[in-house]
Image (cartoon, helix red, strand yellow):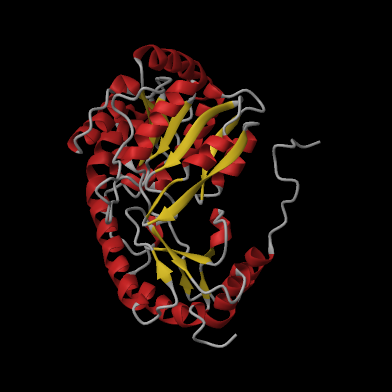
Amino acid sequence: MFSSRLPAALAPNALTEAIARHRAAGRVAFDLTVTNPTEVGLAYPRDVLAPLVHADGARYTPSPFGMRAAREAIAAEYARAGLTVDADRIVLAASTSDAYGLLFKLLCDAGDDVLVPQPSYPLFDLLTRLDAVVARPYQLEYHDSWAIDRTSLEDALTPRSRAVLVVSPNNPTGSMLRSADREWLDALCARRGIALIADEVFADYPLAPRTDACRAIGNGSAALTVALGGLSKSAGLPQLKLGWMIVDGPDALVTAALDRLELICDTYLSVSTPVQLAAPQLIDSGRAIRARIAERLRVNVARLQRALVGHPSITWHPPEGGWSAVLQVPATLSEEALVLRLLDEADLIVHPGYFFDFPREAFLIVSLLPVPDLFEAALDRMLPIASGALAS
């Protein structure tokens, strides 16, 4: 009766069940997987949602690409960061996930494929599958810095490839797209007639970008290029569901893409009127929220760096940006066994590397968003166990 695009098995895995049991028993003292900025003790302005109460919010005037004032506010925000963006090339969506769905409909027939990075956020597998698209992985490799394994990407290409997806800063590695990789990708995609989709939702949170880090991939692309952003991360407002796509590339390709996107977006009209009307003020007030998040990240990165000094068996690559850090730990236990042990012995939740498709063990991924004192206390419990200092 049900679509084969959905997973055949929906039962929770052993780790999910164990976390549920511990939560029910009140035994989760520390959650190092939390990435919801509204739940980590950050001070939001009391009137942050006031712009949603707008006199024109009671009127419905649908626009496929979104209201002009909202798109102009987004373009102005990019301009403040030194990036030139044409409001006519901005398309609003309800979220980044919504934007991916629109783009897969734009670019792909059923059975076509898109290339996705590994390690990276695991949502791609389901997003592609729900649109009857095949996700074909390519690898990121670490040699002094994370970069695209170009051979693996070229090997992943097929005659049915329609797009290459990049995430910069990457979730969870915190790595940014290298400028040389960006130029290589642009030329490759242009030559093969496929699109380049750049998820830049964490771009407003640089931590320690290297000199060859690429801040944004738009502006003068040879290939059809779409950059994704949204209020969820840039303003710390995931509950308001406003994302956007910036379409770039040769004029003829951009025009053709926008003509088709107009039809797709007009079919769904997924963005609510109140959030579009409020967008200019939300973007403006979001800078203060973003500054608080950025300070939280800096504090926790410093605390993590200090805590790791006493555990030389654990290595890490300080993130260039984003909200997460990756720790490589001794592979004395499987990642799942280690995460379960941390849950049982330290009342602590952390993500295993396999959740993000790391190619080997053993990695743990920690969020940098928790309240700093709680974050430090969690590290005090976690690191001795993860380093193997406590006997198995």
- On screen, residue 243 above or below 343: above
- On screen, residue 277 above or below 251: below
Q: Is residue 19 left or right of residue 258?
A: right
- The residue positioned 47% from the left and 78% from the top of the image is 382
- Tag count: 0
Between 247 and 184, the one nearer to me in the picture: 184
- The residue positioned 38% from the left and 28% from the top of the image is 58
Q: Quadrant of residue 379?
A: bottom left
- On screen, residue 320 above or below 183: below
Would residue 387 be visible to someone looking at this image? Answer: yes
Image quadrant where one finds the N terminus: top right
- On screen, residue 352 above or below 90: below
Q: Quadrant of residue 274?
A: top left
Q: Position of residue 335 (x, y in %)?
A: 59, 68
Q: Position of residue 30 (x, y in %)?
A: 46, 73
Work out which residue is located at the far right of the displayed protein and give it.
Answer: 1
Q: Position of residue 84 (x, y in %)?
A: 23, 28
- The residue positioned 68% from the left and 66% from the top of the image is 14
Q: Is residue 343 left or right of residue 173?
A: right
Would residue 26 be visible to someone looking at this image? Answer: no
Between 228 and 117, the one nearer to me in the picture: 117
Image quadrant where one finds the C terminus: bottom right
Q: Is residue 116 left or right of residue 86?
A: right
- The residue positioned 61% from the left and 75% from the top of the image is 333
Q: Quadrant of residue 293?
A: bottom left
Q: Position of residue 262 (x, y in %)?
A: 45, 17
